[in-house]
Amino acid sequence: MTGRSLSWVLMIVTACVLRVGATQAQDVPGIEICTAEKKMERRTSCLQSNVNFLQGTISRLVTDSGQKIDAANRRIEALESRVAELRKTVAELQDARKKQPQPPVKEGGKDNAKESGR
């Protein structure tokens, strides 16, 4: 294929993709304004469509929020267990520090570094 024919093919493919996307966008469900309908049957159908849309949206949101809450609870449990491990480690380190022999205290309570500076 030459560069010129390739550009034509790309333009045609792009036009087809855009056309398909435009036709799919028309069928997106959502809230409709039902007060414009004159016939009661059409108004009822419009209202029922709105109710179905809202019920589907609510059920999707309930599922999504339930999954997010479950994930957050699992994360909290993992963090709580990690905090417990860290507290245990800190307690062990403090115990080990207490068991170490303390350096001897110098007589007179003076520090050699202070005396050498004078």
Image (cartoon, rainbow, N blue to C red):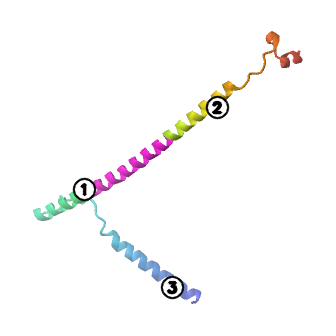
In percent of the image, x 46 and y 42: which residue is there?
Answer: 77
Of residues 83 and 21, the one drawn nearer to the viewer in this rendering = 83
Between the residue at mark 2 and the residue at mark 3, the CA separation in whole angstroms equals: 73 Å
Q: Position of residue 55 (x, y in %)?
A: 25, 56
Between the residue at mark 3 and the residue at mark 1, the CA separation in whole angstroms equals: 46 Å
Of residues 50 and 115, the one drawn nearer to the viewer in this rendering = 115
**Three-letter amino acid code of the residue under disc 2:** Leu
Q: Main secondary structure of the magenta part?
A: helix
Residue occupied by mark 3? 8
Q: Quadrant of the C terminus?
A: top right
Mark linked to residue 93? 2
**Three-letter amino acid code of the residue under disc 1:** Gln
Regarding residue 88, the answer to whether it shows in the image is yes
**First in sequence: mark 3 vs mark 1:** 3
**First in sequence: mark 1 vs mark 2:** 1
Of residues 52 and 9, the one drawn nearer to the viewer in this rendering = 52
Single out the residue that lies furthest toward the top: 108
| Discs 2, 3 touching: Cβ within 8 Å | no
In the image, is residue 64 part of the stretch drawn in magenta?
Answer: yes
Q: Residues within 10 Å of mark 3 (few under 14, many from 20)?
A: few
In percent of the image, x 21 and y 57: which residue is there?
Answer: 51
Q: From the viewer's perspective, is residue 109 above or below residue 25?
A: above
**First in sequence: mark 2 vs mark 3:** 3
Mark linked to residue 55? 1
Label 1 residue SS? helix
Mark linked to residue 99? none
**Three-letter amino acid code of the residue under disc 3:** Trp
Total number of numbered discs in the rendering: 3
Label 2 residue SS? helix
| Stretch of the chain drawn in magenta | 54-79
